[in-house]
Amino acid sequence: MANFTAADVKKLRELTGAGMMDCKKALDEAEGNLEKAVEIVRVKGLKGVAKRESRTTENGAVVSVVADDNTSGVIVELKCETDFVAKGEKFVAVAEALAAHVAKSAPADVEALMASEIEAGKTVQAFVDEANATLGEKIVVDRFARFDNGFVSVYMHRTAADLPPQVGVLVELDKENAEVAKDVAQHIAAFAPKFLSREDIPAEMVENERRVAEATAREEGKPEAALPKIVEGRVTGFYKENVLLDQAFAKDNKKSVQKILDEAGVTLKRFARIRVGA
């Protein structure tokens, strides 16, 4: 019989997050050696990562880090399979560690992030694989955004009281204005614009909207002479739905977001909105 106690089993569970029976078996195999038992749990858990690759990850959290002086900030989406795991302290701790690493290392994209070292000799990929093993679910770093060239602010939104934030919005103004930054970020969270300005929309997308608008108007039997005006009106409606600066401001729908920014004397340079699973 291996020489280990209930306290050893508890310690191993705290270190690895593995089930009680798995911890007992690992300690038995390791003949009571806690360090070796941790390795056994990790190895067996990591073998299970491959089996989880086909599973879907529609739950998770968005976490953020913003510098004290608001000169930089990040939001990171970490996804998992169930909301049970998403609301757990260990999952959130993993997400926060990743956000802190992104803020510090400024990777170019997710591929570069996964290849970077989060600890001495350990890549982010290995760090996430360990989380897969410990939490027993497929864990995926899906997206992140990092701004560092203006006044950066973040808004985090919870869709349920018992879950971590599911929506994160990062905004960057050309100058400091905390109130406007917060208001615009909240607006973005609610209205989910796809583009900052009309100039950001691919030309082919606009042309397609024009074609659809014209075809729809003809199908509706609208007069030929009225078609240009009808098409322009519907394209303008497309802008108001998808372009942030054209949208009616959430707190005062008589003004556009552009008008709010103009009145405050600031320019919104860019924004990023991440909703878990969307």
Image (cartoon, rainbow, N blue to C red):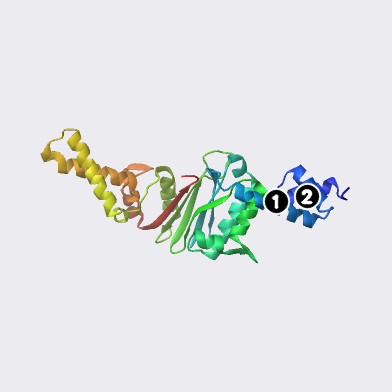
47 and 23: which one is in front?
A: 47
**Where is 90 relative to 102, above or below?**
above
Q: Does residue 68 appear in this view?
A: no
Q: Are marks 1 and 2 in contact (CB under 8 Å)?
A: yes
What's the amino acid at mark 1? Answer: Lys
Q: Which mark is residue 221?
A: none
The image shows a total of numbered marks equal to: 2
- Work out whether residue 268 or residue 132 is closer to the camera in this orientation and state it: 132
Counting from the top left corner in percent of width and height, residue 220 is at 19, 33
Residue designated by label 2: 26
Provide residue 80's location: percent of width, then percent of height. Answer: 57, 46
Q: Residue at x 68, y 50 (%)?
A: 45
Residues packed near mark 2 inside 10 Å, few (<14), some (14 to 19) or many (20 plus): many
Which picture quadrant has residue 211? top left
Q: Which residue is mark 1?
A: 44
Three-letter amino acid code of the residue under disc 2: Ala
**Label 1's element?**
helix
The extreme bottom residue here reads: 120
Disc 1 to disc 2, C-alpha distance: 10 Å
Q: Is residue 51 above or below residue 113?
A: above
Residue with the most extreme top position: 221
Report helix, strand or loop for mark 2.
helix
- The picture places residue 97, in percent across and down from the top left corner, at 60, 56
